[in-house]
Amino acid sequence: MAATLQGKRIAFLAADGVEEVEYTRPREAVENAGARVELVSVQPGAIRSVNHLDQSREYPVDVTTKEADAGAYDALVLPGGVANPDFLRTDPEAVRFVKSFFDAGKPVGVICHGPWTLVEADVVRGRRITSWPSLRTDLTNAGANWVDEEVVTDHGLVSSRKPDDLPAFCAKIVEEFAEGRH
């Protein structure tokens, strides 16, 4: 990918239980496109990723949700994993952080179970979105138009279903993040 994100600062919001490949592959894609990435989480220190349900590697946290300012970033990525978004959606500072990106019209990428945090932030109403299939009812109840597609874009919100969708997801977030505010 070309360095289309040169000078952009991208936040990745994740907690323990993040699906490793849904964190590492999009991060690699935006970094390869020239972006500077920071890992934002609910606690300082490090987060523990998973490979499906098996514990995997730790990743150092750059800033906590309590300290993070959405105004300092150009875009946001919410990786999946079952536990990760469940931790995030119960943290008021994480929910505030996510909502700030939508209020500012900044692009957001979300995959798999990541949309649970979007539901809590009340930012999916009227939007076309995809996710891991088990979130369909939650997203529909929150007012979203859920579809079963590899990658969906709706006014700067890029969503995908699962790790198999990562090539399309990564390409689309780089494109949307390069476009900027929507």
Image (tube, rainbow, N blue to C red):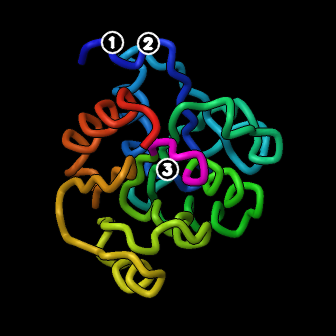
Residue 116 seen: yes
Left or right, 27 with respect to 86, comes to left
Residue 3's disc is 1
The residue at 29%/37% (across/down) is 170
Q: Is residue 135 left or right of residue 94?
A: left
Q: Which mark is residue 78?
A: 3
Which region of the structure is painted magenta? 102-107
Residue 83 sits above or below residue 151 on the image: below
Q: Position of residue 154 (x, y in %)?
A: 32, 56
The amino acid sitting under disc 3 is: Leu
Q: Amino acid at mark 1?
A: Ala
Does residue 103 belong to the magenta stretch? yes
Q: What residue do we see at 39% from left, 73% from top? A: 126
Q: Badge 3, how many Cα within 10 Å: few under 14, some, many 20+?
A: many
Q: Please say if 79 is above or below 58.
A: below
Q: Residues within 10 Å of mark 2 (few under 14, many from 20)?
A: some
